[in-house]
């Protein structure tokens, strides 16, 4: 499969980037074609421009986004590696969704306020790898996993209905023993091993 790996952490030595590297290694070992897009390395601009917003319900202006758009549209699989901050996406990743998962790219706007029509029909597998500083029970029992719900229902549910979601959260990520990290890397490898080759 052609796998797009999107990384959204500002620190190159971060745990998040280390986990992304593990996913890339496993994808390569399994013979997938990997395309990496590190949003900080490419200096991705997250803010929706005035021209983009004005064109949102017409012919969406993709000026400067062509590479990101084609990478997303050509992907059979997607890996998202990012920290969860304040129970949400990092701004740079939220901006990638705002600007790249746009009309004419990830979906088509519908007439008369009907549901939007998905366009990412070729996207089959999605793996989310996220780190959180909080304990599991705050994310799951207090906040009800808001980021997972957005990925599953808002993004994939609207734009990639054929995609199977695997979601891996590493909690208390600032204070983890090395063996905990290694066990989490095994989980990443197992999820990728289950993908079709």
Image (cartoon, helix red, strand yellow):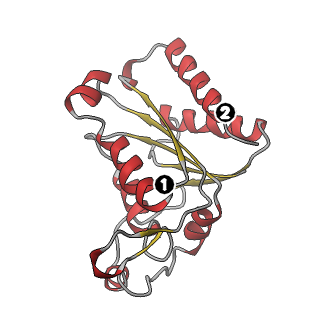
In this rendering, position of residue 110 left or right of residue 144? right
Residue found at x 41% / y 60%: 158
Q: Are there few (<14), some (14-19), or many (20+) residues within 10 Å of tag 1?
A: some
Q: Secondary structure at mark 1?
A: loop
Q: From what the image shows, is residue 19 above or below residue 43?
A: above
Q: Residues within 10 Å of mark 2 (few under 14, many from 20)?
A: few
Kindly report which numbered mark, 1 or 2, lies closer to the viewer in this rendering. 2
- Left or right: 36, with 85 as reference point: right
The residue at the far left in this view is 142
Foreground residue among 165 and 113 = 113
Q: Residue 183 lies in what quarter of the image? A: top right
Q: Residue at x 46, y 62 (%)?
A: 159
- Which of the 4 image quadrants contains residue 170? top left
> Where is mark 1, residue-wise?
40
Q: Does dot 2 land on a helix, a strand or a loop?
A: loop
- Which numbered dot is residue 194? 2
- Residue 55 is drawn in which quadrant? bottom left
Q: Position of residue 116 (x, y in %)?
A: 38, 70
Whichever of callouts 1 and 2 sits on the residue coming sooner in the sequence is 1
Q: Nearer the viewer, residue 45 or 139?
A: 139
């Amino acid at each position: 499969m052609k796998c797009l790996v999107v990384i959204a952490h500002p620190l190159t030595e971060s745990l998040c980037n280390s986990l992304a590297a593990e996913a890339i290694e496993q994808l390569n070992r399994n013979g997938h074609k990997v395309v990496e897009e590190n949003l900080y390395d490419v200096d991705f601009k997250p803010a929706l421009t005035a021209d983009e917003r004005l064109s949102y319900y017409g012919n969406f202006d993709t000026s400067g986004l062509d590479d990101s758009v084609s990478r997303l549209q050509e992907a059979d699989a997607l890996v998202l590696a990012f920290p969860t901050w304040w129970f949400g996406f990092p701004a740079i990743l939220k901006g990638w969704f705002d600007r790249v998962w746009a009309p004419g790219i990830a979906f088509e706007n519908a007439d008369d306020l009907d549901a939007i029509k998905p366009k990412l029909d070729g996207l089959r597998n999605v793996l989310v790898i996220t780190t959180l500083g909080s304990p599991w029970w705050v994310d799951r029992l207090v906040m009800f996993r808001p980021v997972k719900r957005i990925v599953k229902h808002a993004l994939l549910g609207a734009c990639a209905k054929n995609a199977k979601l695997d979601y891996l959260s590493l909690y208390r990520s600032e204070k983890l023993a090395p063996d905990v990290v290694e066990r989490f890397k095994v989980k990443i490898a197992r999820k990728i091993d289950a993908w079709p080759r």
